[in-house]
Image: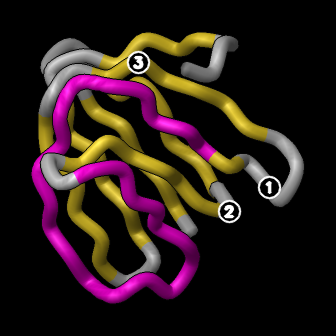
Amino acid sequence: MQLEIYTPERKSFRGEVYGVRLPGIDGSFEVMEKHAPMVAALVPGQMKVLNDKTHFSFYNIKGGFIEVLNNQVTVLVEGAEPTSIEK
């Protein structure tokens, strides 16, 4: 699926991924390929990007929103900083 991460300043990431785990207002949730369409609010926390089945990357994000539609995931957040440490 295609993932795009946007902040007010720039596009932080765009690429094909296996899945993504995000901090939602009711707790963490995952979006995988062929996920149903949805829009959800995000809280500050860590986003885990599953680059493939065995490799991950992490971003510390500020609050925002996610939209999932037709295997396209768009993350709109106030800030997103790459990190190599899982929290």
Are dots 3 and 2 in contact, CB under 8 Å?
A: no
Would you say residue 32 sits in the magenta stretch? Answer: yes
Which amino acid, by three-letter code, is at mark 3? Asn
Return the x and y of residue 10 as percentages of the image width and height.
28, 19
Magenta extent: 27-49
Side of 69 relative to 53 (left or right):
left
- Which element is circle 3 on? strand
Are dots 1 and 2 in contact, CB under 8 Å?
A: yes
First in sequence: mark 3 vs mark 2: 2
First in sequence: mark 1 vs mark 2: 2
For label 3, the residue is 60
Kindly identify the residue that appears in the image at 40 percent across and 69 percent down.
Answer: 72
For label 1, the residue is 52
Kindly identify the residue that appears in the image at 36 percent across and 50 percent down.
Answer: 28
Q: Which mark is residue 65?
A: none
Q: Which mark is residue 18?
A: 2
Quadrant of the frame with the C terminus = top right
Return the x and y of residue 60 as percentages of the image width and height.
41, 18
Which amino acid, by three-letter code, is at mark 1? Asp
